[in-house]
Amino acid sequence: MIQLKDITLSFGSREIFKNLSWHIKDGKRIGLFGPNGVGKTTLLNMLAGLYTPDSGALTVPPSYVIGYLPQEVEEFDTGRTVLEEALSVFKEVLDLESESESIAEQLNEIEDHSSGEYKKNLARLDAIHNELRTRDSHTIKFQSEKLLLGLGFEVGDLDRPLSTFSGGWRMRVALAKLLLQNPNILLLDEPTNHLDIESIDWLEEYLKRFQGSVILVSHDQYFLNRMVTTIAELSTGQITEYAGNYSSYVEERQSRLEIQKSAYDNQQRMIKETERFIERFRYKNTKAKQAQSRIKMLEKLERIPVPESDDASIKFNFPEPKQSGKIVLELSQFSKSYKNKDGTELKVFEDVRPLEISRGDKIALIGKNGAGKSTLARMLLGTEPFDGKRKLGHNVELTYFAQHQAESLDPSNKIIEELKSAGHTQNDTEIRTLLGAFLFKADDVFKPVSVLSGGEKSRIALAKTLLSPKNFMILDEPTNHLDIQSRNVLIDSLRNYKGTFVVVSHDRHFLDRVANKIWYAEDKGLVTYPGTYSDFHYHQTKREEELSDSLNNNKNETVQTLDKPRPSKDKRKEAERRNRLYKEVVEHGIENMDNWEELSVKQLKTALSNLEKKIHSCEDKRIELEQFLADPSSFNEKGRVEDLSLNYREIAEDLQKSYERWDLVTAHIENIGDQ
């Protein structure tokens, strides 16, 4: 358990926390929530040991391992491959393995097995092997590969240099490194920012199985609802806990606000009535004593603070766009490819059937990172060449938003001036309302664009897009850099929007609320689905379950053929062949067979169990030999020592081979189970 007691922290004149106390119990999954700028990231930094409080006590158990994933990670050693970078968290294990190999080579070169040097090296090798066995060193590569694949990397990516990947993919490597450390508590600051939907689904399932505590900051409502069991609200430097997920928190918080507002209103009425009494009677002899008594009462009264404003009251509606023709945009059958640096062709889309966008369509374009979502968005826009034809419909006016739109802002303008330059019809009050929804409040609107961060500029570019009265919008990741309040404003605006749009996003709550059609990019193609994201996800999950059941049935049928030959002569021969193969595996060991992948899952698991027994037996023999060779009296039998030294090297080589085959077979079984 981590405890914070009376924590105070300030940056200059700005007080972040004042007498903050919080007990973080083991095993909890907590969503740390609050408005932007309230200090959520600061609190995570303090829990991670990066900030020291000005006063108060932060108590962390001495054996606790804290894993922290910030929003931005430091640059990696980009000379490594993806897998090498992930494995770098096991530096001590890798160093021990390297030392073990070096010592083994030295032992081979020492002819006098009775020498002190030989005995010293042998003793060190024994200690290293014991340490490696304690740390399950033979599983680290498999675990690293499994995590990286779960986070969206392909098998071929693992040996590519990390320098060839974007910042978002490098963030995934940082997340993999964090999870591989298996900490007692995970601190995650916006962990879904750089993940596609499939990877977010995988992360959810992983974190649900995680045995430690999790504290996460996220603006992804869908993720919060599925992940957390407690919401810790950070407000005015204090923590208030709410049991349940994000939706439960919203209901409970609204209920508390209504109670607080009622209590505040009642107290204000009482104060005003008391003040009127005082003003009326304080100078009259008959009532002066009562007036003085009520003055003292007001002075001692503990005032109920002004309730926070209701975020749901912020609204923005798009300007009414011109009506377009019934068909907004058409793409003929199309393909799209790029040339790699080495001259090879990278196909993004291949012979995709014609697409048609009709007036009123609200399309969510989703898919794995790298599937071509942003490419297709630019093809719809008309700025990306492709093999095919694009036809824009009658009276269609198109506007486009992507993260790079922030580069087009005029840095010399103030924020409010930049929005006025969009040629809109809204007045200053309406513009400031929109800016408030996008986290620019009060005097913030007069800041020059030049001093804004990348995320703030992106929000300004999105606000300009929303002010443009166009009837067809293409929005590429519009919810990036928005908090939940701002996302809800955008959701309401898009739901009331009279035009047509295509939106690329990985925010499942956002997509579920705004889209009436789904386009799913996969395998160089595009699946179109009429309905909401929840409908699409349900049918995708059902399809995958049916496919998995079908594969399992096929596997069961395969196993049955080993026991009950089928009438077909070819199938009977195949069953007999597989039986012979299995007998060879049982006789010689799966580590010595090349065609072991042809076995059924049941046979593979049996063979794997036998291999594990062999590994344990070899480990016992190796330890016995090390103990014998480390005993000085053993060297009285010189011939026997030489034989046992040779035997020791053979066992070490056999163990290495067995561990490598164990990794391959385990990964193969996992892969079959996931299909």
Image (cartoon, rainbow, N blue to C red):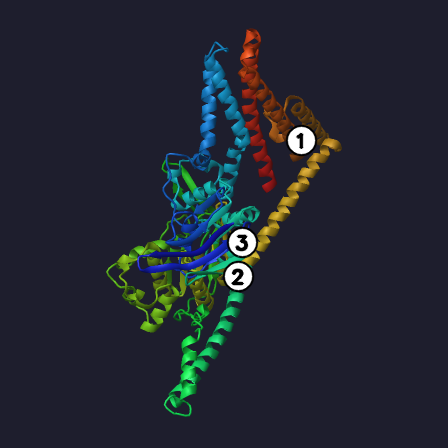
The first of marks 2 and 1 along the sequence is: 2
**Residue 657 seen in this snapshot:** yes
**Which residue is more in the foreground, 321 or 167?**
167
Kind of residue indicated by mark 3? Met
The first of marks 2 and 3 along the sequence is: 3
Circle 2 SS class: strand
Where residue 626 appears, x then y in whole percent? 55, 19
**Which residue is more in the foreground, 622 or 147?**
622
- Circle 1: is it few (<14), some (14-19), or many (20+) Cα within 10 Å? few
Circle 1 SS class: helix
Q: Quadrant of the C terminus?
A: top right
Query: Which residue corresponds to the image point at 34% horizontal and 61% vertical from the top-left?
Result: 460
- Circle 3: is it few (<14), some (14-19), or many (20+) Cα within 10 Å? many
**Which residue is more in the foreground, 464 or 67?**
67
Where residue 406 appears, x then y in whole percent? 32, 56
Q: Which residue is mark 1?
A: 606
Mark 2 vs mark 1: in front: 2
Q: Which residue is mark 2?
A: 242
- Name the image quarter holding residue 82: top left
Kind of residue indicated by mark 1? Thr
Determine whether, in the image, residue 215 is placed left or right of residue 546: left
Mark 2 vs mark 3: in front: 2
Any mark on residue 227, and which?
A: 3
Kind of residue indicated by mark 2? Tyr
Where residue 75 appears, x then y in whole percent? 36, 41
Query: Which residue corresponds to the image point at 44% horizontal and 58% vertical from the top-left?
Result: 20
- How far is disc 3 from disc 1 in space, using C-alphas? 36 Å
Give the vertical position of 297 relative to 38 (above or below): below
- How far is disc 2 from disc 3 in space, using C-alphas? 14 Å
